[in-house]
Amino acid sequence: MDLIGMILYFFIGFTTQYLDTSIGMGYGTFSVPLLLLLGIPPLHVIPAVLISKAVLGVISGITHYAVGNVKREVVFPLVTSGILGTFVGVPITVILPIQETSALIGVVLITVGCIGFLNVVRGVRMGEYSRKKISISGFFAGLINGISGGGYGAVSTTGLLSSGVKTRIAIGSTVFAETVVALTGVLFYMFFIQNINWELIFALLMGGIISTPIGVLTTKRSPSKKLGVAIAVLVIFLGASSAYVRSEALALGFVSAALVLIIYHFKMLGHRRIQIGVGGINLGIGVCTFLFAYLFQTNAVLFNLTALFEGVIFWYLIFIGGIFVVAGILDVFADY
Amino acid sequence: MIRKIFVAAIGMMQVIIGVSSIFFIYIFYSHMFNFQIISTLPIEQTSFYLLLFLVVSFFSLISGLLFIQEWRSLA
């Protein structure tokens, strides 16, 4: 391995580990594609990243613990549910093709990022967290990790933020819990893979070890809200890049993000206004369905169906229209 | 009391309509059971009607769930 190559790997280790330690995600997600782009075969890259991630995880986990960024009551449910999620996720990898997996993870990350962003911006009561929500976050993080081998930090950190855990505790606890998962992966590779590129691991480790304390201090001193927003934006970006393999997945991811925004705005409006809005749309759909049934009956809309099908569809449309109109009336004339 | 019964019935029907419609769209879109042969519509028009149907189905589901939530709060 030449010197320029070693320097490049050192900087990849440095920057991606800084990102991972300071905001709880990004080491595997960014270093794997960068190393593959440099022409290193995947059989060398994956074990190298896993091994270096485990070693760096132990170092950054201990450092986060030492400066008070880790809480036992957050880590315990996160690790146990994470292991359960990983066990569920691994068999899914066998069933799903790799492109579909990447697209699925993209959609999940975009949605999770949006939820995290809105929770941070809206101001979740930080410090008042629930164990149930932490366990759910851990399970999904483990599931995504089991399916794709990455994305643990993104889902876990954002999930913890949405559960009300303080940003620095969310990052520190995620880094700590992720180390356990990475160590399991390393043990697996140690048994089954012989092609371990120790020079690459050494270069990545050197860069990572230097950036770890800088990243931990960044977390310790950063304002909680700004850091939370940065994390959520990065998760959306990661999701978009992962979903990019399938254009439909990218579109679906942004549609789900838009839905999250719409629901958020609806929540701001208040229940009565939402009900009036939903009632209006119900009435509109009902009237349009009646009109469509009439056009269908008079053959103004041609479907070229048999007489039996035409009869069934006409009465089905009348039934649906009736349901929507009654629903609209109930919504608009609610007792308040 | 009458409102409570109506809210429950309409809510459940809207949820059933929404779920069954989404299921039907999936079957139609993925060419299961050769449903596409029944209709002689051109493919562009089929996509348009499916999209329209999908939007209405999702709305039906959301509206139905809101009714069920209201019914539970009334109970």
Image (spheres, coloured by chain):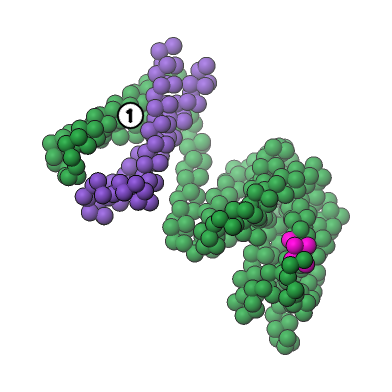
Chain colours: A green, B purple
| Residue A67 occupies quadrant | bottom right
Residue range (magenta): A185-190
Could you tell me which quadrant the N terminus of chain B lies in? top left
The magenta stretch spans residue A268: no
* Extreme-bottom residue of the structure: A2
Badge 1 marks a residue whose secondary structure is helix
Q: In the image, what residue occupies the spot 86% across and 55% down?
A: A66
Place of residue B16 in the rendered image (x, y in percent of width and height, measured from the top left) = 41, 31
Q: Please name the residue that numbered disc 1 is placed on.
A: A324
Q: Is residue A235 above or below residue A290?
A: below
Q: In this view, does A177 lie to the left or right of A297?
A: right
Relative to B11, is A231 on the left or the right? right
x%, y% of residue B42? 22, 54
Q: What residue type is labelled 1?
A: Phe
Q: Can residue A287 be seen in this view?
A: no
Please give the name of the residue rendered at 45% of the width and 19% of the height, measured from the top-left corner: A336
Identified at 58% across, 49% down, the residue is: A112
The residue nearer to you, when weighing A175 against B27, is: B27
